[in-house]
Amino acid sequence: MIRHKSIGVIGILLLLIFTSGCIISAQNTTQLEPVPAEQINSMDAALYPLTYLIAKDMEQACCLVGKTARELDGVPTDDPAVELTLLKLRRDIPFSFEAGLFDKNDTLIASTENLGKSIEIGVGKAPNHYTAEELKAAEPACIVSGYSMLLHGDNGFTFTTAVYDAQGNYNGTLRVGINTWSLFSGINEYLRNEYGYTIWVAQPDGLVIYDKDTDEIGRNLITDELYVSETLKDAVELILKKESGNSSYLFYDSTWVNSTQTNVVWDTVYPGYGMEWRLVLTDNVPAKTETETTATPTTEELKSFVEKAYVYAQTHTKEEALHAFNDQNGEFIDGELYIFAYDMDGTILALPYQPGLIGSNRWLMEDSSGVKILQRMIARAQQGGGCVNYMTANPDHQYAQEFKLSYVMPVDDTWFIGAGIYLQENPLSQNHYLSWTEHEDMTYQVRNMQYLAKKEGIESVIEMIKDPDSELQIEGLYPFAVTENGTDLADALKPELEGTNQLGMTNSLGMSIAREVISLAQAGGGWMYGLWGIPPENEEEYVLIYVEPIDVSVYVASLIILG
Amino acid sequence: MAISLVITVILILVASLGGLLFGASIIFDQSLNDPDVLVHPAISGNDMIITIYEGGRVTELAQISLEIEGYAPVVQNVPGGATEIVYVGIASQVTGTRAVGVRGIFTDGSMKILKIIDFKFT
């Protein structure tokens, strides 16, 4: 695992650094206040280990890509070793999307993606073309692309390196898509929870490639109308011009109404050939509220609230219904409850407290654990509706990240509505967070099962799931395998389920975990939360699950208990 | 003379079209505001739950036929005042994406499709 060696050292370093100093932020200011040198020093001290960590991650990932390319030199595309080698590479870079082999004309000839169906072998074209000379000049490093939509539809960047034939002639490229959200969000959660800072990351052209607020990712700091304030323009100019430094600017707080002073320090990371990133650490983090101020509606009240909106939507035109749902003084706002509405492609139709976002698309929006919020909601709506869990900002608690339970219903095949409540009793709402090492361990375990299933056969993987001492096992994680029809093939947490059909097994929220897992696997894999009975008492607790397909009929997953 | 005739014909056409659109809009609005019976199907494990909300003929609803694409329809009685009809185990073998239809059978013997929607069972 790439990051494990550095984590302990960095953790201790940060702990020592933060034993002194406090963070002061000028709220609702209209002009910039001077920042004490002590604060800048504290922020710098937090930033530099992270710059090192990210640079190290990139260097090691690039090394793996280069090493894999050498293993693929001269190997015919139809050799089974190609698929195995690509799966191993994807397993070993946990923040990767997919790995693919392309010919000299940038056409995809082999890929790790097997169920996503978004990339067609022999048809899919790489978005960037590099000449053999450019690739040679980059060696032994990889060329790092700019942030953009990748071949399979997600956004990120790619590592690219040359592959040669048996005679040493240039024969094409090996490319690995990297998930910037996965790369940075674990670090961001660590900083936010332990020290009250967050990060954002930008390319020299001003494109934001990571921000704690997904709605800002992909915007350009230089040209986007969101970033028009004079102080911000000045700060952006400085950040993009200088490799490191500190500055302050006025920008919206989490309400997107009030302006507050944000103090930043930044440094530069060189992720590979042809790219550099500004890693910017900010101090504008809302503190989590410890006490509950208002009574949270029950799940039944939540459901009734959404059903009332459903009846309204069914008995009025879509236009009338959306007008009512977007009315901040209307009948569809009740305490913390409000109705949201989305198209089945993730486009926002109603969001009463953030009207400026209506029309924007959230299909790719992920929470801090990697759960694609809209995709899970849509999957649930397409089952007739039900409950969905995810982490999101709570406006009642200074927009702190908290665990939310939403209830969604489809109005018809084209759009759905929902509302949610924050679950204060959930550990993820109370300063507990999933560390990036746990997240990477889960990714590794599942992708290792994919790799071993190809290498040794699915039966071998099933036996390893059952064996608590097998090489597959990682402490605190529970692997399992299920068929497309819902039959449990092996289950490390509940071995007694082996051979039973799980489609009908529901939790207290009426959710069939098996149906959700299958739906997620058939969409290409990903992350989801679920409420699940935990042995020996079978008491329900929230779990996080990562799922990947082995093939069209067998899916593997890993589960961690969020407690 | 010819010009006034043409104008008269155009006026008649415009008035007819306007009346047609107005009538259609009233019919559309009425169907939205006063559905026979407003229902919603949802999956819960292997069960399907039909929730009955409201509608002009809700008191006349005698039976509901649940129709899943590729499977035989299953009819259940609707007790007076019922707001939920549960089809236990009906989805136990159902996977993938299928159309789901809910047909209402009324006390006078008439039938009407109350809902058709695509479901992703897995």
Image (cartoon, coloured by chain):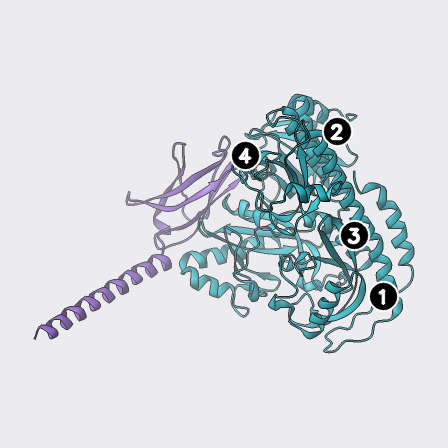
Give the chain ID for the purple colour.
Answer: B
- Nearest the camera: A366 or A276? A276
Q: Earlier in the sequence, mark 2 or mark 4?
A: 4
Mark 4 lies on residue:
A121
Q: Earlier in the sequence, mark 4 or mark 1?
A: 1
User: Does the image show residue A425?
Assistant: no
Mark 2 vs mark 1: tell me if same chain.
Answer: yes
Label 2, label 1: how far apart the Cα atoms are: 45 Å
Question: What's the colour of chain A in the image?
Answer: cyan
Q: Residue at x 64, y 49 (%)?
A: A156
Name the residue at 72% across, 78% down.
Answer: A30
Residue A318 location (% of width, % of height): 43, 59
Q: Secondary structure at mark 3?
A: helix
Which residue is identified by label 1? A40
The residue to which callout 3 is attached is A190
Marks 2 and 4, how far apart in space? Answer: 30 Å
Viewer-nearest of discs 2 and 1 = 1
Q: Quadrant of the N terminus of chain A?
A: top right
Question: Which marked residue is nearer to the observer: mark 3 or mark 4?
Answer: 4
